[in-house]
Every structure is written in structure tokens, then in C-alpha cells.
Image: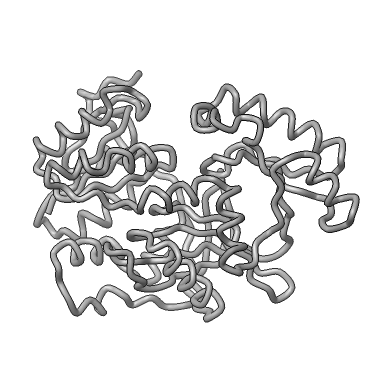
Amino acid sequence: MNILFTCAGRRNYLINYFKQALNSNGKVIAVDMQLSAPALVEANVAQKVPSIDDGEYISTIERIIQEEKVNAIISLNDFELPILAQNKKRLEKTGARLLISPANVIDICFDKWKTYHFLLENEIKTPKTYISLESAKEALYKKDIQLPLVVKPRWGSASIGIDIVYTEEELELSFRLQHLKVSRSIPKDISAPDAKNCIVIQEKIHGEEYGVDILNNLDGEYHGTFVRKKLAMRSGETDKAISVIDERFNTIAKKVSHATKHVGNMDCDFFIANGEVYFLEMNPRFGGGYPFSHEAGINTPALYIAWLNNETGLDQYNQFKPGMAFSKCDRILKIPKETTIK
């Protein structure tokens, strides 16, 4: 079983978790546009590829799949997911299985305005969200919401570009500045079809923040919910967390699972405020908080491999326990001499 990770970046832990799950019965191939990406150092095979928006990107991935006899492909990048979804049939003609959710699910998850309406339609509590400055100011005037508010790109990733605004003047300034930033940033092309509505304004929930992995099998059927309470954040990712078992999350997660039929892991953000659970965002991929779930006892890489091999009797891979606290830390990796750093 050979697994290809695209846009591998800094996800060293996933490389190692999958290597452990394979137990030398296959290899992990990691690719990135920079050979100095940390995750490539620990993969069995590392290759440099063009940028995801390069015209040769998909053909390069095809070549690597064929050369390395890849069985399954896992993407770790929000911006890449729509591109892979568009090319799913082409890539799977190689015989490899592309482990991503359906294109419409990726679209709902990536577009925060569509996420908001998806949650409303499924009667899931979520912060009130507005697509225009005028509608947000009207809601403030009517006291439907109150400051502070959150201003962020409609299509974004990893908490990049998020502003917390405390006055109406800050709201106006941030909204205009966010538009300018998007016009010259990575989401520019994605936002182009609706550039006037590329920023959302959201009610700020004051409460405890949780990360949740909603896990479906590779056929989109619900498998389980794995929750961690966030104790500290750094650069948009969970830095410290403790595992939790709470039926309230399970109920919402099952509803999301059945409505989306997403494939594999879905990384989600929740808040608890005044005893109510609010669903904030969902990302149909492994997220930066996954190691906390893994170390607390859910071995999702082993489940992926077992599902790919049509195995049954998988209870051994789920030993998830509450009250398990973990913290991330940095480490230094030596980059091979032959790697050219640019």
C-alpha cells in the first residue's frame, strides 16, 4: 500500500503516523513545491512539484502516481482540494484512489457563506454571519448582534486574514482592507467570480473553543466523533488540547456526516457558550489538531489503510479516551545535502 501526500508542508506527524500504520508494508510519498518542506524529510520518497495553479501540476501528480505505484492520494491543502476534485476522474484512471470528499462538499466547506447556510438548513447553531457591510451594520443597529465582530475572507485557510473589530469604524476599515488584501493574495482567483462578496462578517462567540474530527469511512458513512478542548492556539493551529467525550458533539457530528457524506476525516471548530454548542467551520481534510485525537487513542491512518484493504473488525484502532492532554513543540530537522533551498 503506497500513500501519496500532496502539499505535505509541515505535516510531519501525518507522514510518521501513516508510516507506522503501514508497518513497512508500503511507503509514504510526499510532494511539495519546495524540497525543503519539513514533511518531505521524513517521507520514504520525496519529490518536488509545481505550484497547484501551474498548468503542469496535475500531469506531474499523474506521473508520480504511476512511477511510485501509488494506491491512495491524500491532500492536506484547502486551496488544492477543489483542483483535485475537478480532476478526480483523470487521476483515478491511474488506478489510485483519491481520498477527498465530493466537489459540492468541498465547495460548501471552503466557502464560509455557504457553510453558514448549510448549517442553518440543517438546524445547527452557528454564529450569525453577514456577506455585506450594510447588512452587518443594520444588524448592529437592530441589536441582532453586538461588537466585537469577526471579519475574515469568505474563502480562506488556517485563520489567515482574520480581524477582530471593536468599533463600527474598525469594522468599516477592516472590511475595506480585507477586500484589498484578498485582491492580491492566494484566494484572489477563487474569489474572482464574486469579488464584491469575498469577505464575511461574523458574530463573535465568547466561550470555550473545541476542535472536532468527524470521521466517515471512505464510502462516506459515519464512523465516529473525536473531540478536543483547545487550551492554547498558535498561528491558527491548536497548540495545547485535552481530549473530551461529550454526546452533544456526537449528535451534531452525526447530522453533519449524514448531510455531507464526506470522505474520511473532517476537521471542525466548535464553541460552547452559555451551555449551547455552536458549529463554526469545517475543513474536509486532516487538520492541525489531528495529533491530539491520535495521541488520545483514535488511529485514523490505520483505519484508512484497513478500509482501503477492505478489512473488518476495526475496533482495535479506536481506543479514544477523555482527559488526555498534549502540547505541541518545535524541533529541528536536517535537510538532505542534495536539496536545493530557494
Quadrant hosting residue 173? top right
**Circle count:** 0
- Left or right of 10? Residue 96 is left
Q: Nearer the viewer, residue 215 or 341?
A: 215
Q: Nearer the viewer, residue 122 or 44?
A: 122
Q: Residue 236 placed where, x, y %?
A: 56, 46
- Left or right of 89? Residue 235 is right
Q: Nearer the viewer, residue 302 or 221?
A: 221
The colouring scheme, among rainbow, by chain, secondary structure or one colour, is one colour
Q: Quadrant of the C terminus?
A: top left
Q: Residue 333 placed where, x, y %?
A: 32, 38
Q: Residue 47 placed where, x, y %?
A: 21, 31
Instruction: Please say if 189 is above or below 12.
Output: above
The residue sitting at 58% across, 52% down in the picture is 233
The residue sitting at 32% across, 45% down in the picture is 75
The residue sitting at 26% across, 35% down in the picture is 31
